[in-house]
């Protein structure tokens, strides 16, 4: 009895029909590339320090009112505190010169009670520095509110996680094509609405909904293409085509962000072009495999006959007459619990979930960390994206010429060894550390790419999208914790370099107003203000 691939063998593998489906589905994945990393720019923190109101201070005190501290061996202005403004005004009015007449380390500090001043050298604005409601409300996601910045990214990935979980089951029940276009619509519409956010809470809620369609779109497109295409073209699409579509969107992001330094302009530019995907509905068909699994043989044959016309070949009178019973099964519905009922399927699912979790956690940690490789975040992001191109090509070659398990395990080992060796590199050899980190990014990207294809191949049609969605959902737990893993540098505060710094930190606890005044009695008694 013929299976599905044998039944449609007369179409060939690379006719006009397959070419159209291949390239349109790859194009539909591009928004996932820039959508996954938009927060690299939208949620970035510009250089900032406490805002100093326009008061009558001498030039010396205007330069000295922000404390200087050691961060990673370099002197930097404090981001969360300043010397008490009333004390500094007194000292300035009395003609004292900082550093010569006044020991700055003995002056009392206060938090940024008047807000912050943000640099516009790199960004015109991000959500961290955005001002809303006619300057009445400002995000200011820094210092005591700094936790909101990584939490914003986590909310997005929680949306991605939920989307992966539900979209797989919806796709297996209602079809690949409706879910694909529904998730594209969710991304487009809610990215556009985010531009009009009037508060951080509103932005975060919209970001969560946006995340629902992010990876769901990718999974739906991956499964749809894997079920329509056959032979070596299917492997090419699953391992390299979809991933290069993702990488293309990833590389487009820093180019757009470079010219659009305002976060609202960037989101608008990323949402509006997605309207070009509307005509795709009439060119991308439903999966004939899925239709057969639902008993819709006539609809599946209609799609194949249309493909035969596109490819200019003659279709047999009955396409699926001898198709095996497995492909024309009843309309019985399957759900996530079917992945757990059978011991073999259960063990396979658990192993794939664990490997996917490990790879995706490493992938996003390295992707967001490599945005700091260069002083220019646009160059950093582009380098991080460009590394993925050879990784996806390697993934395709590995899937075509080597066993699946051997390829996946090898990439994990290479990534683990290269990242471990970074800890042993002397501090002066920064280029070697960078090379090892890029090798790790290349290896883990290669492995993550193969996992999508590997997972899709192991499960039957009735469970394929559900299984792929579940594994992707579990892997997204890793992406959810990534922002906080990268933010564990003393919770955004520089580590103390000396015992004195630690002692002062212990007294202050945080850059806030102290109960005791700094003893400068002459100045305070003669205070004319």
Image (cartoon, helix red, strand yellow):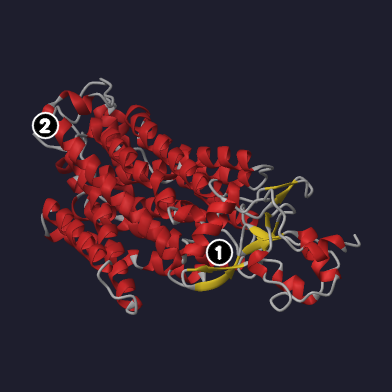
* Quadrant for the C terminus in the image: bottom right
Mark 1 or mark 2, which has the lower sequence index? 1
Picture disc at residue 419: none
> On screen, 14 above or below 226?
below
Q: Indicate the position of residue 465 as horizontal and vertical percent values.
A: 29, 36
Assign a secondary structure to mark 1: helix
Q: Residues within 10 Å of mark 2 (few under 14, many from 20)?
A: few
Residue 389 visible at all: yes
- In the picture, the quarter occupied by the N terminus is top left
Q: Which residue is mark 2?
A: 344
The image quarter in which residue 389 lies: bottom left
Depicted 140 relative to depicted 322: above or below? below
Q: Is residue 323 visible?
A: no
- In this image, 176 relative to 235: left or right? right
Residue 121 lies, with reference to residue 23, above or below; the image says below
- Is residue 28 or residue 214 the one in the foreground? 214
Mark 1: few, some, or many residues within 10 Å (few <14, many ≥20)? some
Pointer 1: what residue? 256
Q: Are marks 1 and 2 in contact (CB under 8 Å)?
A: no
Relative side of 100 to 498, left or right:
right
Horizontal placement of 412 versus 70: left or right? left
Q: Is residue 390 left or right of residue 142?
A: left
Disc 2 on helix, strand or loop? helix
**Farthest left residue?**
1
């Amino acid at each position: 009895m013929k299976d599905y691939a044998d039944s449609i063998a007369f179409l060939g593998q690379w006719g006009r029909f397959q070419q159209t489906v291949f390239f349109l589905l790859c194009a539909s994945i591009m928004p996932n590339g820039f959508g996954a990393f938009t927060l690299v720019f939208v949620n970035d923190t510009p250089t900032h320090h406490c805002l100093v109101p326009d008061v009558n201070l001498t030039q010396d005190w205007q330069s000295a009112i922000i404390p200087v501290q050691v961060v990673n061996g370099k002197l930097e202005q404090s981001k969360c505190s300043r010397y008490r403004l009333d004390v500094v005004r007194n000292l300035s009015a009395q003609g004292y010169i900082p550093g010569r007449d006044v020991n700055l380390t003995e002056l009392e500090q206060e938090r940024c009670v008047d807000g912050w001043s943000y640099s516009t050298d790199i960004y015109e604005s991000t959500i961290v520095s955005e001002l809303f409601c006619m300057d009445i409300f400002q995000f200011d996601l820094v210092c005591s509110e700094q936790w909101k910045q990584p939490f914003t990214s986590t909310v997005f990935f929680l949306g991605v996680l939920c989307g992966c979980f539900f979209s797989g089951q919806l796709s297996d029940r209602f079809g690949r094509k409706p879910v694909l276009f529904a998730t594209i619509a969710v991304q487009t519409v809610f990215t556009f609405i985010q531009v009009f956010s009037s508060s951080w809470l509103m932005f975060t809620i919209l970001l969560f909904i946006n995340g629902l369609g992010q990876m769901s779109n990718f999974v739906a497109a991956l499964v749809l293409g894997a079920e329509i295409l056959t032979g070596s073209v299917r492997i090419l699409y699953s391992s390299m085509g979809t991933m290069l579509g993702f990488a293309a969107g990833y590389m487009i992001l820093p180019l757009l962000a470079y010219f659009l330094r305002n976060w609202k302009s960037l989101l608008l530019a990323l949402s509006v072009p997605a309207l070009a995907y509307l005509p795709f509905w009439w060119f991308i068909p439903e999966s004939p495999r899925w239709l057969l699994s639902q008993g819709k043989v006539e609809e599946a044959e209609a799609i194949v006959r249309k493909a035969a016309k596109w490819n200019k070949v003659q279709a047999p009178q009955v396409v699926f007459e001898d198709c095996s019973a497995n492909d024309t099964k009843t309309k019985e519905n399957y759900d996530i619990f079917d992945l757990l009922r059978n011991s073999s399927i259960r063990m396979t699912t658990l192993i794939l979930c664990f490997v996917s979790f490990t790879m995706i956690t490493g992938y996003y940690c390295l992707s967001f960390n490599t945005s700091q490789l260069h002083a220019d975040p646009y160059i950093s992001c582009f380098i991080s994206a460009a590394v993925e191109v050879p990784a996806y090509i390697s993934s395709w070659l590995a899937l075509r010429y080597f066993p699946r398990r051997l390829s996946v395990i090898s990439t994990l080992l290479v990534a683990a060894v290269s990242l471990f060796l970074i800890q042993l590199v002397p501090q002066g050899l920064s280029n070697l550390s960078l090379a090892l980190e890029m090798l790790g990014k290349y290896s883990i990207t290669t492995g993550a790419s193969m996992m999508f294809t590997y997972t899709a191949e192991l499960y039957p049609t009735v469970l394929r999208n559900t299984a792929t969605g579940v594994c992707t959902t579990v892997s997204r737990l890793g992406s959810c914790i990534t922002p906080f893993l990268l933010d564990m540098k003393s919770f955004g505060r520089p580590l103390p370099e000396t015992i004195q710094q630690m002692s002062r930190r212990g007294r202050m606890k945080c850059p806030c107003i102290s109960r005791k005044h700094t003893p400068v009695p002459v100045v305070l008694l003669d205070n004319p203000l």
